[in-house]
Amino acid sequence: MLQKSKLALRDGTSLDDLIMRDSNEVSLRVMTDEELYKLEMEKIFAKTWLLLGHESEIPETGDFIVRDMAEDNVIVARGPDGDVHVSLNVCPHRGMRVCLGEAGNKRVHQCIYHGWAFRPNGDFIGAPVEREKMHGNDVDKKTLGLKKARVHLYGGLIFATWDVDGPSFDEFLGDSKYYMDQLFCRTDSGLELLGPPQRFVLPCNWKVPGEQSGSDGFHTLTLHRSLMEGGVMGGTAESIYDQAPGMYGVDISCKQGHSLRCLEAEKTFKMFADVPFEGKSTRERLELLTPPGITKEMIPELFKNLSEDQVNQLATIPPQVGGLFPNVLIAFIFAPRTDGGSSGALTLHTYMPKGPDRVEFTNYIFAEKDAPEQMKRDMLQNSIWNTGTSGVIEQDDADVWPVIMKNARGAVSKGVTLKYKALHGHERPEGWVGEGLLYPGFTKDDTQWNWWLAYYDLMDAV
Amino acid sequence: MTWKTKSTAAPDATTILRGLVSKKRVPLGSEVYNRILETLYDEAAALDERRIDDWIAMIAQDIIYQAPIRLTRTGPNRDRDVMRTMFHFDENYESLMMRSGRLQKSAWAEDPPSRCRRFVTNVRIGECATPGEYEVVSYLFLERSRGDSPDNERTTAERRDIWRDVDGEYKLARREIIVDQSVLGMSNFAVFL
């Protein structure tokens, strides 16, 4: 028997009534409930590691960007020490935002209301008219800094958490690190963000796109059937469900809720179907088809930065899409186009909660820093074409999610459950090297169910 | 591992919003002004009526069609808020053709289709250095009704175009859509601006 959760809403509904671990169902009510939303903000978004950007956005001392950790606005700045600092963008004097721009360079952040001033690392400098001690008569300045978050850089990605004593970032990644490293820590110079992120707001709860980021592969066949109709993926409009391109591979996940779908390029995309991979070594395979975003010149770097087993996976069955719990979608995809171009697209999205019925979709578009300029240009265009605001893949997602949200409001509809009963169960494919929970074959509900179990664990925690 | 890099997202890559550049104005009410204004109205009608092939026919094959993102800035850089390193649209003729082709297939974002009204105003026109090409700046107000929602999605933008006289018809050769929101309130840009 599973231990029952002590978490209950005011009307007596328990977490177990919402996340039904015995039957693998989730009540649609989780998408609209305001009380649950407030608990999520405390127990998930004020606790776990959140993605805020990439350090290539703030290369110089004093460079800053302003981002959100759910509804908490933060300043992400590079200090004179060269380190990246994340501090709450709320003046401890009267609660005004200290920094009003989205990006720039400042050695001193001065609140425009009464003039309290702070360093890039959040330390309090002072209040105007120093002799009058407007910060308080007997108050130590050290106590008046902006609230600081704990920061971790991973492959240049900036993560932060308010849980100063909580799990380390490596503990947060768990067994997924082996696979994530293949995307984020594989080259000498690492990734570069090509510009500030696209930002747009959708009228839905953060968990509607969130649970999809737990590696929902199945929706591609129907929601994104224009990819098959357009001839990008295998099959034709008539044979989509027979051929089921992009469905067979190995889905990986872990108890922390992260996941990735690992797919063989030749079985996914029409244009790679005839590449003669048979009997080729890892290096030869990489020469024939480099992973998305990688050039032939970077191949030796892969062997330098990754283990041989990791490079072998990247060459044969690379991670393509997935997510980091709670709110990051990863798409490091080949993304061939109908015009034959296949420069690849490297994007990350965050789905930041903005109330129970609003979410900000933030789309970060990357390239390898050492990629040639023309390749970066192609990847930018390819990423914009496929993902984010106008992306032909994701405009369809953005159309579905608000409708699910509308449904979740009905007195009867909210009792409908989301079903995660198509489960494969953990199975280690022969010769597979990485750890984690493994689901070979046709993509099933396992990874998304693990996403909900990770949600349950954090919500249940005291 | 950390590294320092000159990022394309760094502030110096931004530019200031500036409308009409040409000093040779095409006066309001002149023949050319009237014909271009009429073309803008025809274009809006083609898009609102979802006659996408008619719209494609109005486009030059060397078109550059982009919508840079806007950023909220303060201080000395406060006017440098058009970020031409990142876009909502970054299109050429082929990619616009592919988008229009997709609309004929299972493009659920526009099936059922949105009901759109494109209001085009504040049209200012100048002559380009190349004869027969005109710089056309206009304001766009897009109202978009989706499904059974009584609340329209909307967006406002300035469009900086180049229209080219090709055998007596004007073709769109360049469009830069400068949206006003740094965070878009529209769920997607599955419609053209």
Image (cartoon, coloured by chain):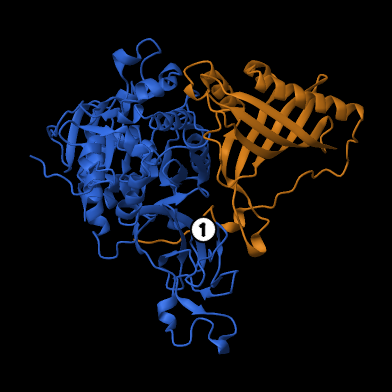
Q: Residue at x 25, y 41 (%)?
A: A13
Q: Amino acid at mark 1?
A: Lys
| Residue A281 visible to an observer of this rendering | no
x and y, in percent, of residue A18 in the image: 25, 38
Local packing at callout 1 (Cα closer than 10 Å; few below 14, some 14-19, many 20+) is few
The image quarter containing residue B69 is: top right
- Percent of width and height locating residue A232: 42, 22
| A87 horizontally vs A325: left or right | right
Residue at 50% x, 47% y is A197
Q: Which chain is orange in the picture?
A: B
Q: Is residue B72 visible?
A: yes
Left or right of residue A284: residue B14: right
Residue B35's x, y, as percent?
84, 24
The colour applied to the residues of chain A in this rendering is: blue
**Hey, which residue is sitting farthest top in the picture?**
A238
The image quarter containing residue A288 is: top left
Task: State the residue in front, B19 or A368.
Answer: B19
Residue at the limit of the structure toward the left, as seen here: A1
